[in-house]
Amino acid sequence: MLLAAAALLIVGAVVFTLGVREKDLPPPASVSPFQYLEDRKAQIYENLRDLQFEFRVGKLSDEDYQKTKLELQRDLAKVLAEIDSLKGGPEPPSIAAPEKPVKRNAANTCPHCGASFDRPLKFCGECGKPMPGDAA
């Protein structure tokens, strides 16, 4: 009797599982493109922190660290450009357009690590700390 009840329960569970129709399932939650990009940005920042930690504890060589850091920074730049385009921000400059020479000044130099950049930034590209003043 117990064996028959267990078999009936197993058969019922299999039939119920296989009998679910696709139209009975709830529609998947749609993710907005903005939310996807924000999640991707957060993941890249987390990867950069993990990379820096692994380099500091000696798990990575300097060459591997620099190569991976550069790849992550490029991915981050692409994601930030897409976020800006969704927000209606300025369009990223086209690659074919000639760049205007920019004079380096104190506003383009990081007060924390001393790195200087061609254009004003919100955060230092080397140490990641906030840059002073109204940055682009």
Image (tube, grey):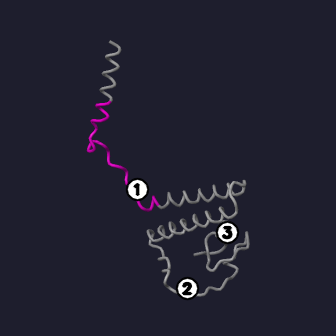
Q: Which residue matches tag 2?
A: 99
- Label 3 sits on a secondary structure element that is loop
At horizontal 45% and vertical 69% (from top left) the residue drawn is: 87
Q: Amino acid at mark 2?
A: Glu
The residue closer to the viewer here, 2 or 24, is 2
Q: Amino acid at mark 1?
A: Val
Tell me how far mark 3 sits from mark 1, CA to CA.
Answer: 33 Å
At horizontal 26% and vertical 41% (from top left) the residue drawn is: 21
Q: Where residue 104 sits in the image (x, y, percent)? A: 67, 83
- Along the polypeptide, which appears first: circle 3 or circle 1? 1
- What residue span does the magenta drawing correspond to? 14-36
Quadrant of the image for the C terminus? bottom right
The residue closer to the viewer here, 71 or 25, is 71
Q: Is residue 82 left or right of residue 134?
A: left
Tell me how far mark 3 sits from mark 2, CA to CA.
Answer: 22 Å
Q: Which residue matches tag 3?
A: 126
Q: Which residue matches tag 1?
A: 31
Is 126 above or below relative to 11? below
